[in-house]
Image (cartoon, rainbow, N blue to C red):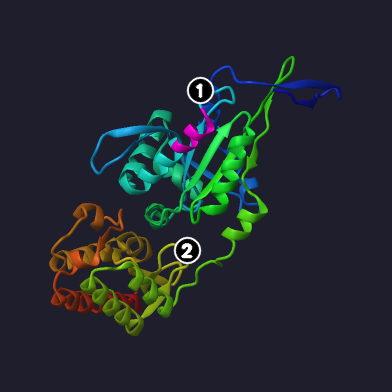
Amino acid sequence: MDGTIYLIGKDGKLEEMSQQPYDKEDILQKYLADYPNLLAGDQMDEAKPKRWLFISREVGVPKEEGGSDTWSLDHLFLDQDGIPTLVEVKRSSDTRSRREVVAQMLDYAANAVVYWPIDRIRACFETSCDKQGIDPIERLREFLGAEDSQLIEDFWEKTKTNLQAEKIRLVFVADQIQPELRRIVEFLNGQMDPAEVLAVEIPQYVGKSQRAVVPRVIGLTAKAETAKGKRPPKKWDTDSFIKDSKDRIQNQYAYQLLSDILDFAEKADLPEFGTGEGTGSITFKFKDLRSKSGLVSVFTVYSDGRIQFRFANIKNSIGDKYSEIFNAMLLKIIPNKNWDENDARAGKISPTIVLEEAFPKKEILESFKSAILEFVNLAKKDSKVA
């Protein structure tokens, strides 16, 4: 390996630093865990630099539902958009073929999007924080720049949606990216969508008294960027939402439920379509001046046939009383409840359930719609009194 950089000292003199290999692969792995910015998110997207939330090292990947871990991923990160970023670290001196390294990463990716439940990723993050003596909630608030617990739940929900849509990022890291691996990365990144494949070269430079590392992103060819930029940010509306639903939902009853809820939301109050690239969403909201935003989110339906109950937003917007009322209301109606009652009452969660499980009979959906209108009218009446 060769290459030289020059460090300017406080005395104005230059110190020559030559490129040298890492003594151990673990050194580079630890650097990444301690300093995630070495992934050079500013080079990946200059307009919107990527920021990194470190989830864990040595994350197990199973190859079947409920199975034991078959592989171990070096690092898992999430960026600020909830995109899972799988990182595999190899020294340039690694004798394994480039094909073997790439095949290994593709194994991780193909199985992770299927067999990694979001609860497992959250658990890995919390365990990692505990080992570092960090409060996971405070770390997330710092990362997201948000105090609202609903925004934290939304972040995890966005991560779940990205996994389901196979919107992930694969990153090969080495002190020197060999030409063979570079060509493979550039080819895959040009072909894969919505997944992204990149490499980050992090050479080490050593001088008499100092060390330095200089990350550089590889794989962002003009062809790949053009290909991935063909689709503008998704702006969902009724037509696009319905079209996406028809493509995604095979269960005819579930599709009828979604259509009915969409019609109800559009007629009843303030529906707001989402902007997610992978999955369409529409949130039922109502106006309430007690909320900082002036709006309260009650539930969200997704074009893949799920419904999310927004306990956390209700609590944070208009108070504990209403999250408790909302929870009690749903407990009477939804037969297949999949959430913890105490967490829901406290507004700690915003659970999601598939429509056919939430409303196995059409009469249950009708009861739900009536209860929603009653809930909104109560909140509005109290708001006027307040």
Residue that mark 2 sits on: 277
Q: Secondary structure at mark 1?
A: helix
Which quadrant: the C terminus? bottom left
Percent from the top left, x then y, of residue 40?
62, 41
Q: Residue furthest right?
A: 12
Span shown in magenta: 97-103
**Residue 297 location, quadrant:** bottom left
Q: Is residue 29 above or below residue 371?
A: above
Kind of residue at badge 1: Asp
Which quadrant: the N terminus? top right
**Residue 201 location, quadrant:** top right
Q: Is residue 287 visible?
A: no
Which of marks 2 and 1 precedes in the sequence? Answer: 1
Q: Residues within 10 Å of mark 2 (few under 14, many from 20)?
A: some
Kind of residue at badge 2: Glu
Percent from the top left, x then y, of residue 355?
24, 67
**Residue 258 location, quadrant:** bottom left
Q: Is residue 190 above or below residue 54?
A: below
Q: Is residue 155 left or right of residue 263?
A: right
Q: Residue furthest top?
A: 208
Q: Residue furthest bottom?
A: 267
In this view, the residue in front, 96 or 132, is 96
